[in-house]
Image: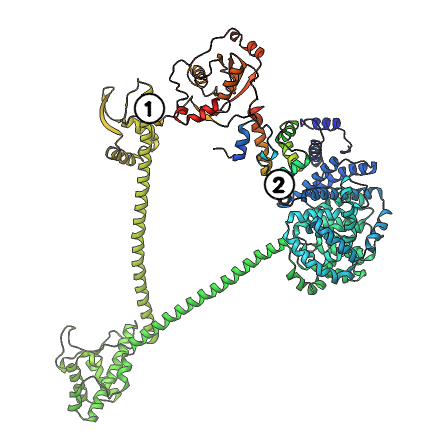
C-alpha cells in the first residue's frame, strides 16, 4: 500500500483543471496563501514552475522552500504529487 | 566570478559547465540556480583549500568559501549593483554552511518559519542582511572605508534610551519580540548607565525570547549581528523595506548591549553559536588578510572560531560580534573596547556559567584590565587564557547569583541532565545506605540469635549452680536427710557435675590430648572429690544413690556401668560418670553453633536449589513443547497451502494428478539437512492433518508401481475466491466540464491504462480488451475500429467511432473508469493521425458489437446500482 495521502490521490486521479494551489499535496492553507501572494494562485502555475525547472526534484524543492517556506516533508509531498500527475497526464 | 553579475546566459553556461542541466533562467528560477551555482563552486573550492583556521572543518569550509564570495561581494558592492537573487543565493549558501555544524537548526528554523506568519519575509531578509553585513564587513576590511564608521558609531552611541525604548516597543509588535531581542543581543553598548532601566525590560524579553523557537532567535541573532553594518553598506533591496527598522535597531542595539551583556542567559547556545559562526564566517574570511593589520583582532577571531566548538556561553555572541567592533577599536570609545576583549576572554573560558556574568563584570572592570587583556591576547592564546583565568577568579564571586537564574535553553537541558544524575545519585546513595543498614541489622539479629542459642545450650550448668536449695531430687530427699547432709550431698553433686561438665566439654571440643574420654571413672571422681575436700564416702554414695533414683537428667550426671548399655542400679556398678551437660568454652560453643547453623543453612539452600532446578526443568520442557507445537502448526499450514495450490493447478491443468504423495510433500517443504530434525514435527503434522483437517483426504495410491500414502484436496474451489480480472469496476470520478472536454472533438479516441503489457499472459487478451470496450459502450453503436497497442507501456487502445458524437459518448463511458484495477483515461486523437497509424480503419464503417450478449465485463456493475451507470453513460 502506498503511503500517499488522500490529497495526493485525489489530485493525481484527474486532470487538475482550475484547481487551487491548495489542492496540491503538501500545500495547506498557510503555504497556499503564501504561494498565492507570490502569484502562484492556481495549481497549474505551480505546475508550470515545476516544468520550467525541468521536473528536477532538487530545484523544485529548493524553489518551493524559498517561495513559501515549505519544510522537507511538504516539499516532498508536493513534488511527488506533481511528478505523478505529470506521469499520468502529461 | 561575481555571482550576482551573471546574466542568464552566463548562469546557464556556468551550471552546464559544472554538470547540471538547468532549465530556463526566469525570474523565479534564478535564485534557485544561483544557489546551486554557489554550492557547486564552494564544493570545488573546498576540495582545493586547506583549513587555515584552528577550528574544525566547517569554519574552514566557510572561511574559504567566504573569502572568494566576499571578494565577489566586495566587487559587487563596489560596483553598487546587486541583484536580490545573487544576494539571496549567497546568503542561503552561507546559511547552509553556517548551519552545518549546528544541530537541528535548519529544521528548527524552517519549522519556526512556517509557524510564524510573516516571519518568512523578515527571516529571509534578515539572512540577506546578515550576509550582506558580512560582505560589507569584508568589504570594509578590504577597502578600508573606516571613516564612515566613526560617524555612524557616534550616532549610535548618542542615542538616548527612552525614545529607543519606545521605538523598540513599537517595533516589537511589528516585528515580533524575538527579532527585537535578537537585535538587542547583537550589539555591545557603552551605555551601561541605562542598566537599571534595561534590567526591568530584560526579564520579560528573556521569557519571551525563550518562548520562541531557538532557530528563530538564532536567525534573529544572526540578523542582528549584521545589523550594525547595515547602515554602512550600500543599499540592498531588502534594506529598503527595512530601512527604517534598521535605523531604529542600530541605536537600539547599541543601547541594548549592556542589557545583553548583563543577561547573557537570554542567549541560547544555539543563538550564540550561530551568531558566532556567522561572525566567524565573516571574520574567517578576513583572517589572513587582516592578520597583519589587526593582530588583536585576528586573535579574537581566531579565538572566537576556536571557541565555536563549545556549545555554552552567551559570551560568544558578544565575542563574535566583537570583530566588527574591535576592528575599529581605535575609533571606538574605550568602553566598547573594554567590553570586547573581556568578552572575548570570556568565551575562551570553558563554557562555565560564570562566563555569563563576565560581561556584566567586565563592564565594571577598569579599562586597563581590558586593554591588558587585549594586549595579552595578542601574545597568544595561552596568555589570553591565563588572563581570562584571572578574570574568572575575580568574577566568580559576583557571578554566582545570576548564574542560577539565567540559564539558556541548552544549559538548562544540560543542567537538567546533571540534575537528573544527581537526583539519581542521591537516591542511589540513600538506597545504598538503606540496603547496608538492612544488611547490618540482619547480621546483628542473627548474631544475637546465635548468642542466645549458645547461651541456652551452655547454661545448663548455671541453673544448677544458682541455688543449692533447689535441687532436682524431690521432696523425698529433703525428708530423708538433714540440712547439713543435704547441703553436703548437693555440694558434692554440684562439684561433680561441674567437673564432669568441664571434662566432657574439653573432650567434646576436641581437646583429646588431655582427655581421652568424656567420662570419669568412679575412682577418679572420688579422688577428685576428696581432693576438693567436700565429701566423704557415704555422702558420695548417698549422692550417687539419689542420682540413680531420680535419673540422670535430674543431676546432669550420667552413671555408666561396665558397658554402655547396662543400667546402673547399684552404686557399686558405677564405673564411669559422665556429664549430660558438657560445659564448653565459649569459643568452642560458638564454633559448634556456627557449624551447626552453617550446615542447616546449606541444607536449606540445597533444598531450595533442588526445587528451583525442578521448576526450571519443567519450564524448559514447556517451552520446548510450545515451540514444537508451533512448528507443527506451521508445517500444517504449509502443507495445506501446497495442497490447495496443487488443487488449483489441477483445476486448470487437467493433466495433473489430483493427489500428492505425502513423502513428496515433505521433501518439497523441508530442506534435506533439516529432514532428520523435523521428523518429529512432520509426523505430528501428518497426524494432525489426518485427524483434524476435513478438506484433505489421505488415501493410498499406486504411483509408478509403488504404493504411496497420498493427500487429496477435496474441497471444491469457491467461486468468490477468484479475483475478477478484465472487468469494469466502476467510475472514479464524475465527468464534468472540469475533467473532460466540453464537446467531443474528434471521432477517434486514445484510451490509456487499460492493461499492462508486461503482465499480460496468453494470446487472446487483446480480444478480451476489445470485448471489454465494446461491452462498456454497448449502448453506443458507433465504434467501428478498435486497436490494442500491445507494446505500449501505457496500455493504449485506439478506438475509432462513426462520428464525433459517438466518440463523445464513448469518452463519457470510458474516461475515469476502473478496469482491472487501473484507472482508464481517454483523450481525443486527430482523425488524420489515426488514419496514418491505422490505415485499415479508413474503411471501417460497420459498428462493432460484443461477441456475446452476456456482457461479462460489466456484469459487476449491473449488479450494483444501475443509476450510476446510467448517469455515467448519459
The foreground one among B152 and B868 is B868
Residue A30's disc is 2
- Residue B42 drawn at (x, y percent): 70, 36
Residue that extends furthest to the left in the rendered view of this protein? B569
Disc number placed over residue B228 in the picture, else none: none
Badge 1 vs badge 2, beta-carbon distance below 8 Å: no
**What element does badge 1 sit on?**
helix
Between B715 and B826, the residue placed more toward the observer is B826
Graded by Cα atoms within 10 Å as few (under 14), some (14 to 19) or many (20 or more), the crowding at tag 2 reads some
Chain letter of disc 2 in the image? A
Q: Residue at x 85, y 44 (%)?
A: B145
Quarter the N terminus of chain B occupies: top right
Q: Position of residue B58 (x, y in %)?
A: 68, 42
Compared to residue B143, the image places residue B602 above or below, namely below
Q: Quadrant of residue B502?
A: bottom left
Residue B514 showing in the rendered view? no
Q: x, y (%) of residue B868?
A: 45, 26
B667 displayed left or right of B731: left
Location of mark 1 (residue): B648
Q: Residue B158 or B726: which is nearer the viewer?
A: B726
Please identify the quarter of the rendering in which residue B763 is found.
top left
- The lab-note entry on whether marks 1 and 2 share a chain reads no
Q: Nearer the viewer, mark 1 or mark 2?
A: 2
- Residue count near mark 1 (Cα–Cα under 10 Å), binned few <14, some 14–19, many ≥20: some
Amino acid at each position: 500500500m502506498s503511503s500517499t495521502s488522500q490529497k495526493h490521490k485525489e489530485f493525481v486521479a484527474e486532470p487538475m483543471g482550475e484547481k487551487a494551489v491548495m489542492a496540491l499535496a503538501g500545500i495547506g492553507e498557510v503555504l497556499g496563501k503564501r504561494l498565492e501572494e507570490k502569484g502562484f494562485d492556481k495549481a497549474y502555475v505551480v505546475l508550470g514552475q515545476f516544468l520550467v525547472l525541468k521536473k528536477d526534484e532538487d530545484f523544485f524543492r529548493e524553489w518551493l522552500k524559498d517561495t513559501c517556506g515549505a519544510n522537507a516533508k511538504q516539499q516532498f509531498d508536493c513534488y511527488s504529487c506533481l511528478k505523478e500527475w505529470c506521469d499520468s497526464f502529461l | 566570478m561575481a555571482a550576482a553579475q551573471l546574466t542568464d546566459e552566463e548562469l546557464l553556461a556556468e551550471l552546464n559547465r559544472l554538470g547540471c542541466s538547468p532549465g530556463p533562467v526566469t525570474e523565479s528560477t534564478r535564485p534557485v540556480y544561483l544557489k546551486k551555482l554557489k554550492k557547486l563552486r564552494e564544493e570545488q573550492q573546498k576540495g582545493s583549500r586547506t583549513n587555515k583556521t584552528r577550528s574544525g572543518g566547517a569554519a574552514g569550509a566557510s572561511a574559504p568559501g567566504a573569502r572568494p564570495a566576499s571578494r565577489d561581494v566586495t566587487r559587487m558592492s563596489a560596483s553598487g549593483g546587486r541583484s536580490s537573487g545573487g544576494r539571496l543565493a549567497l546568503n542561503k549558501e552561507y546559511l547552509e554552511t553556517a548551519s552545518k555544524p549546528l544541530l537541528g537548526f535548519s529544521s528548527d528554523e524552517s519549522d519556526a518559519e512556517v509557524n510564524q506568519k510573516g516571519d518568512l519575509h523578515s527571516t529571509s531578509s534578515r539572512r540577506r542582511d546578515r550576509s550582506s553585513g558580512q560582505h560589507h564587513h569584508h568589504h570594509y576590511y578590504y577597502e578600508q572605508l573606516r571613516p564612515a564608521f566613526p560617524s555612524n558609531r557616534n550616532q549610535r552611541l548618542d542615542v538616548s534610551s527612552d525614545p529607543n525604548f519606545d521605538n523598540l516597543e513599537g517595533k516589537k509588535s511589528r516585528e515580533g519580540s524575538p527579532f527585537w531581542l535578537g537585535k538587542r543581543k547583537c550589539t555591545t553598548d557603552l551605555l551601561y548607565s541605562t542598566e537599571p532601566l534595561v534590567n526591568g525590560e530584560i526579564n520579560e524579553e528573556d521569557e519571551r525570547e525563550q518562548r520562541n523557537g531557538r532557530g528563530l532567535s538564532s536567525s534573529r541573532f544572526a540578523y542582528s549581528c549584521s545589523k550594525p553594518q547595515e547602515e554602512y553598506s550600500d543599499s540592498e533591496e531588502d534594506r529598503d523595506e527595512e530601512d527604517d527598522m534598521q535605523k531604529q535597531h542600530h541605536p537600539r542595539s547599541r543601547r541594548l548591549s549592556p542589557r545583553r551583556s548583563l543577561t547573557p542567559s537570554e542567549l541560547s547556545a544555539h543563538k550564540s553559536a550561530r551568531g558566532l559562526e556567522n561572525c566567524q564566517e565573516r571574520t574567517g574570511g578576513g583572517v589572513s588578510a587582516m592578520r597583519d593589520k589587526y593582530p588583536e583582532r585576528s586573535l579574537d577571531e581566531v579565538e572566537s572560531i576556536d571557541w565555536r566548538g563549545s556549545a555554552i556561553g552567551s559570551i560568544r555572541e558578544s565575542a563574535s560580534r566583537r570583530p566588527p567592533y574591535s576592528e575599529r577599536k581605535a575609533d571606538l570609545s574605550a568602553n566598547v573596547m573594554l567590553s570586547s576583549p573581556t568578552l572575548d576572554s570570556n568565551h575562551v573560558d570553558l563554557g562555565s556559567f560564570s562566563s555569563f556574568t563576565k560581561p556584566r563584570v567586565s563592564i565594571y572592570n577598569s579599562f586597563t584590565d581590558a586593554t591588558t587583556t587585549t594586549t595579552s591576547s595578542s601574545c597568544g592564546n595561552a596568555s589570553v587564557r591565563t588572563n581570562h583565568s584571572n578574570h574568572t577568579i575575580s568574577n566568580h564571586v559576583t557571578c554566582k547569583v545570576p548564574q542560577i537564574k539565567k540559564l539558556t535553553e541548552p544549559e538548562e537541558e544540560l543542567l537538567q541532565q546533571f540534575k537528573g544524575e544527581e537526583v539519581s545519585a542521591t537516591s542511589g546513595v540513600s538506597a545504598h545506605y538503606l540496603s547496608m543498614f538492612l544488611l547490618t541489622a540482619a547480621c546483628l539479629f542473627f548474631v544475637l540469635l546465635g548468642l542466645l542459642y549458645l547461651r541456652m545450650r551452655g547454661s545448663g550448668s548455671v541453673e544448677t549452680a544458682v541455688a543449692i536449695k533447689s535441687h532436682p531430687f524431690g521432696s523425698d530427699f529433703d525428708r530423708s536427710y538433714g540440712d547439713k547432709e543435704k547441703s553436703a550431698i548437693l555440694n558434692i553433686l554440684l562439684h561433680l557435675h561441674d567437673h564432669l561438665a568441664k571434662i566432657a566439654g574439653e573432650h567434646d571440643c576436641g581437646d583429646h590430648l588431655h582427655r581421652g574420654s568424656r567420662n570419669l571413672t568412679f575412682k577418679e571422681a572420688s579422688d577428685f572429690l576428696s581432693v576438693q575436700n567436700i565429701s566423704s564416702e557415704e555422702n558420695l554414695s548417698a549422692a550417687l544413690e539419689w542420682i540413680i533414683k531420680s535419673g540422670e537428667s535430674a543431676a546432669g550426671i550420667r552413671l555408666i556401668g561396665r558397658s554402655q548399655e547396662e543400667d546402673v542400679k547399684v552404686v557399686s556398678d558405677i564405673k564411669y560418670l559422665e556429664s549430660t551437660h558438657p560445659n564448653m568454652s565459649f569459643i568452642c560453643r560458638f564454633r559448634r553453633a556456627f557449624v551447626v547453623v552453617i550446615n542447616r543453612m546449606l541444607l536449606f539452600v540445597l533444598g531450595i536449589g533442588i526445587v528451583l532446578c525442578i521448576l526450571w526443568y519443567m519450564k524448559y520442557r514447556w517451552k520446548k513443547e510450545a515451540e514444537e507445537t508451533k512448528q507443527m502448526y506451521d508445517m500444517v499450514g504449509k502443507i495445506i497451502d501446497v495442497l490447495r495450490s496443487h488443487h488449483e493447478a489441477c483445476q486448470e491443468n487437467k493433466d495433473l494428478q489430483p493427489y500428492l504423495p505425502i513423502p513428496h510433500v515433505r521433501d518439497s517443504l523441508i530442506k534435506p539437512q533439516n529432514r532428520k530434525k523435523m521428523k518429529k514435527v512432520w509426523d505430528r503434522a501428518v497426524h494432525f492433518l489426518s485427524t483434524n483437517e476435513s478438506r484433505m483426504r489421505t488415501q493410498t495410491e499406486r504411483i509408478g508401481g509403488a504404493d504411496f500414502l497420498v493427500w487429496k484436496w477435496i474441497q471444491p474451489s469457491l467461486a468468490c475466491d477468484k479475483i475478477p480480472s478484465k472487468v469494469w469496476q466502476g467510475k472514479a470520478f464524475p465527468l464534468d466540464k472540469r475533467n473532460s472536454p466540453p464537446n467531443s472533438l474528434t471521432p477517434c479516441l486514445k484510451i490509456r491504462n487499460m492493461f499492462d503489457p508486461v503482465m499480460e499472459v496468453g494470446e487472446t487478451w487483446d480480444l478480451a480488451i476489445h470485448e471489454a470496450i465494446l461491452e462498456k459502450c454497448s449502448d453506443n453503436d458507433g465504434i467501428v475500429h478498435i486497436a490494442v497497442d500491445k507494446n505500449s507501456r501505457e496500455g493504449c487502445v485506439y478506438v475509432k467511432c462513426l462520428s464525433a458524437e459517438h466518440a463523445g459518448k464513448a469518452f463519457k463511458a470510458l474516461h475515469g473508469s476502473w478496469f482491472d484495477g487501473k484507472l482508464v483515461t481517454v483523450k481525443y486523437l486527430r482523425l488524420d493521425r489515426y488514419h496514418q497509424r491505422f490505415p485499415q480503419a479508413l474503411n471501417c464503417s460497420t459498428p462493432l458489437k460484443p461477441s456475446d450478449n452476456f456482457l461479462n465485463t460489466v456484469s459487476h456493475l449491473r449488479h450494483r446500482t444501475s443509476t450510476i451507470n446510467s448517469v455515467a453513460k448519459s
